Amino acid sequence: MNLGTLAGLLIAGGVLSVAVLESSVDPWLLWNPVGLLVVLGGTFAAAFVSFQFGEVMRVFRNFLTVLRNERLYPKRDIEELITVTQLWSRGNFRDLSREIETITNPFLRLGVELATDVMTPIDDIVQVLRLRIDKLRAKEAAEAAVFRAMASYAPAFGMMGTLLGLINMLRGAGAGDFGLLAANMAVALMTTLYGILLAANMAVALMTTLYGIL
């Protein structure tokens, strides 16, 4: 788990919670199902229109990468390479095949498999590994594009909810029902808040995905 990202999320959540508790008479006033439905429903509806169904559904899984710690293990990789080299130099191909299957890093395992195949030219090995890298980058770039689009959709639907709330509030102004005016004003303001919060979360996921590409 990436402790830095987790700490940042906890601090942001704590600051927001303290601000809500200290500034609101009733914290539940910030809960507005109608506004949340407008922002979340509109954001995901626009994402489904813009992207394929599978790409949008992968957003839920990829969002968990925010807490994933992308660690490198150079010492372990070097030790595995040394073991494979020793088995190769001894001509122990039976144990070599079993050892290759135990290599943890899938990219390194592919490279070793190609390198131990005497029928594969060096240029072909380099080309295959480069294609593998390009494919991975393209996949992560597509995932980042979904986050980028959703981060731009959320504030727009937040503003749409704000306009709906204001329209309803103005239409009910003549009736003199202050309770109805307050409810419509709450929808107007809360949708803007939800849109900003959702865009911020999508931005975090986007930056994490782009970090993985780089």
Image (cartoon, rainbow, N blue to C red):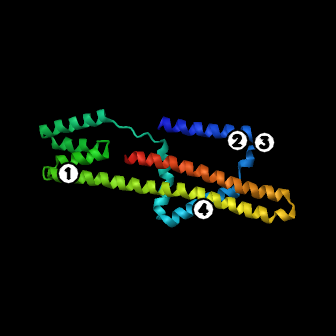
> Which amino acid lies under the numbered mark 3 shown in the image of this protein?
Val
Q: In whole angstroms, how far apart are the C-alphas of marks 4 and 3?
A: 30 Å
Q: Which of the two discs, 3 and 1, labels the residue nearer the N terminus?
A: 3
In the image, which disc is placed on residue 42?
A: 4
**Of the residues tagged 1 and 4, which is closer to the observer?**
4
Chain-order first, disc 1 or disc 4: 4
Please tell me whether mark 3 or mark 1 is closer to you in this view: 3
Mark 2: which amino acid? Val
> Residue sitting at 60 percent across and 62 percent down?
42
Question: What is the number of callouts on the image?
Answer: 4
Q: CA distance from mark 2 to mark 3?
A: 9 Å
Earlier sequence position, callout 2 versus callout 4: 2
Residue that sits furthest to the right in the current view: 176
Q: Which residue is mark 3?
A: 25
Q: Position of residue 49 (x, y in %)?
A: 52, 67
Query: Real-space Cα distance between discs 1 and 4?
Result: 46 Å
Q: Is residue 99 left or right of residue 62?
A: left
Q: Secondary structure at mark 1?
A: helix
Q: Compared with residue 156, is residue 17 higher up or lower down, i.e. above or below? A: above
Dot 1 amino acid type? Ile
- Category of crowding for the residue at label 2, using alpha-carbon neighbours closer than 10 angstroms: few (below 14), some (14–19), many (at least 20): some
Relative to 135, residue 8 above or below: above
Residue that badge 2 annotates? 20
* Sequence-earlier tag: 2 or 3: 2
Q: Residue at x 20, y 39 (%)?
A: 84
Measure the C-alpha gap from mark 2 to mark 4: 25 Å
